[in-house]
Image (cartoon, rainbow, N blue to C red):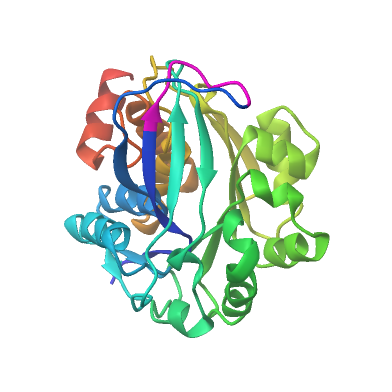
Amino acid sequence: MSPRVIHTAQALVDVVVEVPALPRRGGNVMAPPPKEYAAGAVNILLAAARQGAHCVHAGATGTGPHGDLVRAALAAEGVDVTSPVVPDLDTGICVVMLEPTAERTFVTTQAAERVITVDSLQTSEPVAGDLVCVSGYTLTGLTRDPLLEWLAGLPAGVEVVLDPGAIFAELDDDVRLRMLAMTSVWTGNAEESEALTGEGDIVSAVARAAEHLPAGAVAIVRDGPEGCAVHANGETTDLDGYPQTAVDTNGAGDTHTGVLVACRAGGTTWVEAARRANAGGAIKVTRRGPATAPTAVEIDDFLAANA
């Protein structure tokens, strides 16, 4: 069986409000009716599933309409949900204020998706070759300790893929060091990687990021339309991006990560996986909604048209 993509992070419901501009403090803006989407870890899992990967959500989902929405979205794409449903508590929401520039601002609540244990994560039964995805946001609050304990007990050969998020730089030093010591793959944006390395240039940052990881680990630093840099097998590769007119950047980084890990699970080299991830992110920003990643065929067609 091919390696699986297992995600441990929070699956939420994005409540997206399109605003003409962010209100001033204490102010108000008018907006059309909000739209609700299954999002968070869902974005990455659906992006990976659309590349043909066998995907598993090991995080928690709640009892109620938001939990139902998350599970339905995953089931529709063939993603397995292994962790038992949390009773008497629904999945949380993330309020997303989307501006005409395609920039977005978030307010995230915490609910059933934060109720995890070592045993609930272990329902995913990872084996050598699987790629286990971790979000820096899970390294906070109630989810931090069970996640770190579970990761420490993973079988040899499981690849741990860390998407640090902006929160990673704010974590206690001991938490960051413990996580980095277990990380097989760092995939962060330019700002997150600069916070780790002090390097603003993505080519310089990706090589420095690898120095914070165990020997043989891989680092990827992405910079939206500028593309990404990959450090693997001791070599650094700078890959061009595919600039597009963006209508919604929410979920673009998630799409990049999902395509990346799915292609790697399918046996693609890290450099080629990152090239396809660049294309996936470029397509996604032209679509509204967070979990609107393209299929593998759509990426093939895009790359052929942009060769």
Number of numbered discs present?
0
- Could you tell me residue 75's position as x and y percent? 20, 61
Left or right relative to 171: residue 69: left
**Magenta segment:** 17-25
Which quarter of the picture shows residue 96?
A: top left
- Could you tell me residue 105's position as x and y percent? 53, 32
Quadrant where the N terminus lies? bottom left
Residue 247, placed above or below residue 58: above
Name, please, the residue furthest toward the left: 76
Which quarter of the picture shows residue 244?
A: top left
Left or right relative to 165: residue 39: left
Residue 181, placed above or below residue 97: below
The front one of 80 and 92 is 92
- Could you tell me residue 210's position as x and y percent? 70, 50
Residue 131 in view of the camera: no
Residue 21 in view of the camera: yes
Left or right relative to 115: residue 180: right
In the rendered structure, does residue 18 fall within the stretch colored magenta?
A: yes
The front one of 171 and 278 is 171
Q: Main secondary structure of the magenta part?
A: loop
Which quarter of the picture shows residue 298?
A: top left
Left or right relative to 301: residue 186: right
Quadrant where the C terminus lies? top left
Name, please, the residue furthest toward the bottom: 119
- Could you tell me residue 279's position as x and y percent? 37, 30
Residue at image coords 55%, 64%:
160
The front one of 97 and 207 is 97
Residue at image coords 39%, 81%:
123
Residue 76, placed above or below residue 62: above
In the rendered structure, does residue 143 fall within the stretch colored magenta?
A: no
Residue at image coords 43%, 57%:
92
